[in-house]
Amino acid sequence: MKSNLLIVHGGGPTAVINSSLYGVITQAKKSDKVDKIYGAIGGSEAILKENFLDLSTMNEDKLKLLLNTPGTAIGSSRYALVQEDYDSMVDIFKRNNIKFVLFNGGNGSMDTCGKVHAVCKDEEIYVVGIPKTIDNDLSIIDHAPGFGSAARYIAATTAEIGADVKSLPIHVCVIEAMGRNAGWITAASALARKNKNDAPHLIYLPERAFDEEEFLEDVKKLYEELGGVVVVVSEGLKNKAGESIVPPIFKTGRATYYGDVSAHLSNLIIQKLGIKARNEKPGLCGRTSIAHQSSVDREEAVLVGMEAVKAVVEGRTGVMIGINRVPGDEYKIETSLIPIEEVMLNERILPGEYINERGNNVTDEFVSWCKPLIGEELDEFISFKDEM
C-alpha cells in the first residue's frame, strides 16, 4: 500500500532550497511506495493547520522552474513549536496517510526534525532531514547546500565594489555579510581576489574577538598605501567580553535586534581617523540571488533532496543527509546518513586554521577549501584596467 510523503521548509530560504524540493519531488515520483507528495505550505506551522498542497501533479516543465526560483516555493516559517505541538503531529500524519516526512532546513529545522522523529519513531512514520543553510553552520558535514551560492554572491559583490573603489580611491567601504556566529560567508569574500591589492583588503570574523584599536590601525595603514580600502565584516562581530560590538536597539521575546555592524564601523573610521567611509549591507540579497547561484550548489541541493527520499522510503529515520568531501585533488563529494542527534542545534564555526594570526584575513587553506563550492570562476570580474 502506498503512503504519502510530506516535505517541510524551515527558516530562511536560500538560492537552492527549491532545487532540493525539485530533487524530492522528482525522486518521490519514481517510488512505488509514495502516493501523494505533499508540501507544507508555510513551514512547520502548516503541519498543525494541515495546510498541505499535493505537488505530485506538477509536470516536468513546471518542476524545472524550481531550479531557478528564489525564496521557497512552498513557504517557510520560524514558528516556535512546543511539546504539545509535536505530540499532536502523529495523529495529523496518520489522518493524512503521511508515512514519510522530510524537513529541509538549518540548525533549528534539524532540531525540529529530531523532535518530530522522537514522537514518531514507534509509529512507523519515518523522518529524515535535508541540510540547508547559507550560514554553513550545520555540524558534521563538509558544507551545506545554500552556502555555495551565498559564497559566490559575496565574492562577486566584493569584486564589483572593489573595482568601484579602485577606480575612485578616496574612501573606505565596509561590507557587512550575514552568518550570525559563524564567519563562513564573510570569509568567502576572499574569493574575489585575482591580483595583489584586490579587494577585500581586510576580513573580520566572529570567531575572533574584535579589537577596535587594531581595526583602525589596519584601516589607516592600508588607506595610506592604497587610497581606497574594502573591508568585509561579519554581522556577528563581538568584543573580548563576547558582546556584540553594536548595542541592542530592540528586544522582543527571545529575539534581540542590533544595529548594523558596517554602519558602526564606518562611523568609527570617519570619527576617529577622519577618513571618508561608507557601508554596504547586501542582507537578503546574499541568500536570494539567482543571478549568482552556484551551479555546484544547485546540483548538490538536488542530490540531497533525492537521497532523502531514497532513505525515508527505505525506512531510515532520525537521520540527516550528509555531504562529505572525498580526499584528492579533484573536487568530489559523497553523501551519508548522520544521526539527527549529532546535528540538532550543534553550531559549526570557522576553524582556527582558516583564520590568519592577526585575525584580519583568511588563510590560503580556506580559499582552497571554499573555491570549488562557488562553481564557475569569477573571470568576468577581471577588469580591463588589470590587463593594462
Image: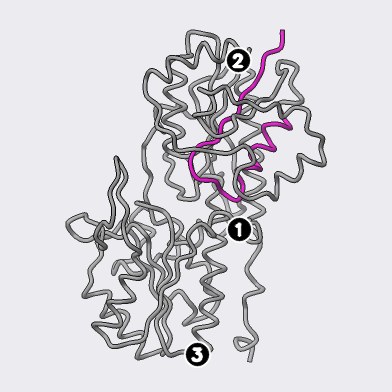
Name the amino acid, label 1: Ser
Query: Could you say whether the residue bearing mark 2 is in a helix, strand or loop?
Result: strand
Left-right relation of 98 to 225: right
Q: Nearer the viewer, residue 305 or 103?
A: 103
In the image, is residue 10 part of the stretch drawn in magenta?
A: yes
Residue at image location 55% in from the left, 17% down from the top: 126
Q: Mark 1 to mark 3: distance in Å?
A: 27 Å
- Disc 2 or 3, which lies upstream in sequence? 2
Q: Nearer the viewer, residue 99 or 183?
A: 99
- Disc 1 or 3, which lies upstream in sequence? 3
- Per the image, the residue denoted by label 2 is 99
Left-right relation of 374 to 202: right
* Quarter of the image where the N terminus is located: top right
Asked if the residue under mark 3 is in contact with the one under mark 2, i.e. CB atoms within 8 Å, the reply is no
- Disc 2 or 1, which lies upstream in sequence? 2
- Per the image, the residue denoted by label 3 is 168
Q: Within the image, what quadrant is residue 2 found in? A: top right
| Residue stretch in magenta | 1-27
48, above or below 12, in the image: above
